[in-house]
Image (spheres, helix red, strand yellow):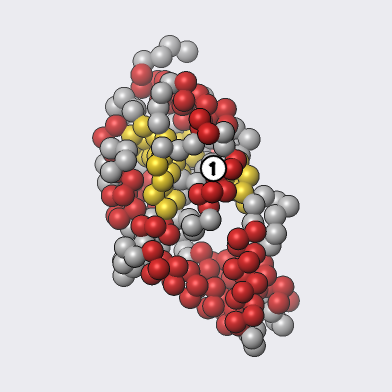
Amino acid sequence: MATVSSANGRVVHAVVFDLFGTLVRWSSDSVPSAAHVIWLKSPARQDLSLARLTEIIDGLDGEVLWDMSSKRRDFASVHCARIMSAIKFAGIGEPESIYELCIEAEKRRRLELFPDVLEGLNELRVRRVPWYVCSNASADVAPKLHALLPTELHPVGMALSCEVGALKPHPRMYETVADMAAPQVSLFVGDRLGPDVIGPKGFGYDPVWIRRDLQFEEFEEGVDDDHVQVGSIADVVMEIDRRQGVQF
């Protein structure tokens, strides 16, 4: 099992998952992202960084938007403003028409599950461990996720930024999912150190840092001695079994 820095041994009654980079990714054969649409339409694309456009739209890892209210429209307006900022940054003269193309592209993008997800979620179902979602995601993500999963493997509940009106690691995100899955008996699994490890830990969750991009020997020892690092959903299930006293 690719698990290091084992946290405390609290028995697990539920699991909260991040989505992107943890359970799902954008399909490689999907339509271009909004950032890619802007890059393609920019007259200065030869000198323009696609990564920089993506950063403008998605925000920096761990960014806290303390001024966002709990109203759904406010989150949407912030996202729209970010797309417009990226369009202007790219030097495009007719931002309104490009903006519409970006919104259409986002609606048409396809999600795909990581290869280990279905088996891992089924193992949770067998163990009667419910799972939940806490994700910086837009409104169209929930139906896309449900379409990828058989009904019996659907999450029990979801805390999405578009509905909460905040982005992880804003406390409101963890407060919302905590009403569904109590931190004292739940793991919080995600791929980003700030929003999925440090943030949830501060709210009382046992964090599990999933590192899909690294091999076990490359895992970072000493980053934080009170959380688990894993390489797959199967490792998450094994961590649950370890806490339940299952013999391997």
Residue 16 in the figure: left or right of residue 117: left
Residue 192 x %, y %: 46, 49
User: In this view of the protein, which residue sits in the foreground, 95 or 48?
Assistant: 95
Residue 14 in the figure: left or right of residue 151: left
From this view, report whether residue 202 is shown above or below residue 40.
above
Q: Tell me if I can see residue 217 in this picture.
A: no
- Going by the numbered disc 1, the residue's amino acid type is His
**Residue at 28 percent of width and 43 percent of height:** 179
Task: Return the residue at label 1.
Answer: 146
Residue 3 x %, y %: 47, 30
- Specify the quadrant of the image occupied by residue 183: top left
- Specify the quadrant of the image occupied by residue 89: bottom right
Residue lying at the far bottom in this picture: please name it: 93
From this view, report whether residue 198 is shown above or below residue 127.
below
Residue 243 x %, y %: 36, 22
From this view, report whether residue 95 is shown above or below residue 79.
below
Q: Residues within 10 Å of mark 1 (few under 14, many from 20)?
A: few
User: In this view of the protein, which residue sits in the foreground, 64 or 14?
Assistant: 14
**Residue at 54 percent of width and 78 percent of height:** 84
